[in-house]
Image (cartoon, helix red, strand yellow):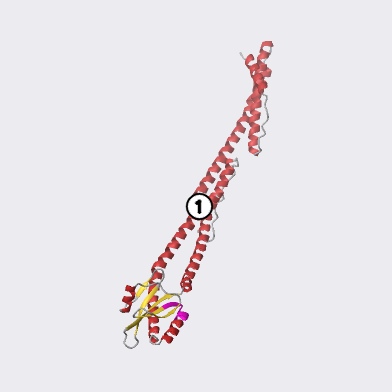
Amino acid sequence: MRRLFARIYLHFLGGLLVVAVAVSLLFAFSARGAFVQESSGRTSRHVASLVSEAFRDPPALTRRVQQINSELELDLVVRDLQGRVLARAGAEPSAFTSEQLAQVRTGLRMVQPNPEWSVASPVRDPKTGAVIGTVETTAHRRARWRGFTRPAVMLGLMVVMFAGAAALLARRISRPLERLTGAVRRLGTGDLTARVPMDQWTWWRRRGPSKGDELAELTQAFNDMAERIERLVAGQKELMANVSHELRSPLTRIRVALELLPRDEEADARLRDVEADLDELERLIEDVLTTARLDATGLPPHPSKMDARQIMADLAERAGRDP
């Protein structure tokens, strides 16, 4: 039954894990992607606004870029309209093509989702609104991994909860089958009193007659079968004992009648043969009664050796006397 428990457990756990992973991937690639795209757009616009305030002053621009890198955990590169790097902090974001940067210089915002979220935004003059440069931003690597820590922990907790629920369900299904298997084995070895205990009603379940589930019906069917077999075997043993006992009375009357018959030399030989047959019949009846008593007590049989040659000799002698 351990193998059945393991199969049920692994099937339920595998199904739950597939559902959990599918749901996680769905949120990761849809809801989370939309959220990251929206938040990265707002962050890039804010960063471009901060950079534009110090764009004309290189030392101030460097300090501003370092401040953004430290406080917002963003890697960024600031370029002028000719593509020259004016300031940099952290790792370089994913490379944008020259065509993409040219579109950014016209005032568009470009997003590079792979291999990581990177955004290139135009930097506008605070007074005129004209595009004076570009800024490329992306999140720190540790910040990106931090975004996956909480979902990973939640997924791990879900796996643990699913594993516990699957174990309880598998045990709920396999335990009645284990009890049924044990009862079947006891019945097969001759224990006719073997029964499978039925699950008791708990306080939260409705009391009263109920058909139960398939396992309960199977258990009840086995108990009914075992009870019928026990009654049948007991009836057969009782019948055998009664029949054997009742046969002794007519045999006794026959033996008394033989004793009252007149005897001569020829009739005496015939009567001795009849008496021998009666003795054998009484031995057979006694054996039947002994077997019935042993079956009733449940004691194990003790076979003994028989002399086959002596049995054959007795049969040959009796056959020689028969007419």
Q: Residue at x 37, y 76 (%)?
A: 120
Q: Is residue 203 above or below residue 150?
A: above
Is 69 colored magenta in this rendering?
Answer: yes
Q: Is residue 196 above or below residue 26?
A: above
Is 289 colored magenta in this rendering?
Answer: no
Q: Could you tell me which quadrant the C terminus lies in?
A: top right
Residue, disc 1: 7
Q: Residues within 10 Å of mark 1 (few under 14, many from 20)?
A: few
Indicate the secondary structure of the residue bearing disc 1.
helix
Q: Position of residue 63 (x, y in %)?
A: 45, 84
Amino acid type, callout 1 = Arg
Q: Residue at x 64, y 28 (%)?
A: 285
Q: Residue at x 55, y 43 (%)?
A: 226
Q: Position of residue 78 (x, y in %)?
A: 39, 80
- Residue lying farthest top? 265
Residue 255 at least partly seen: no
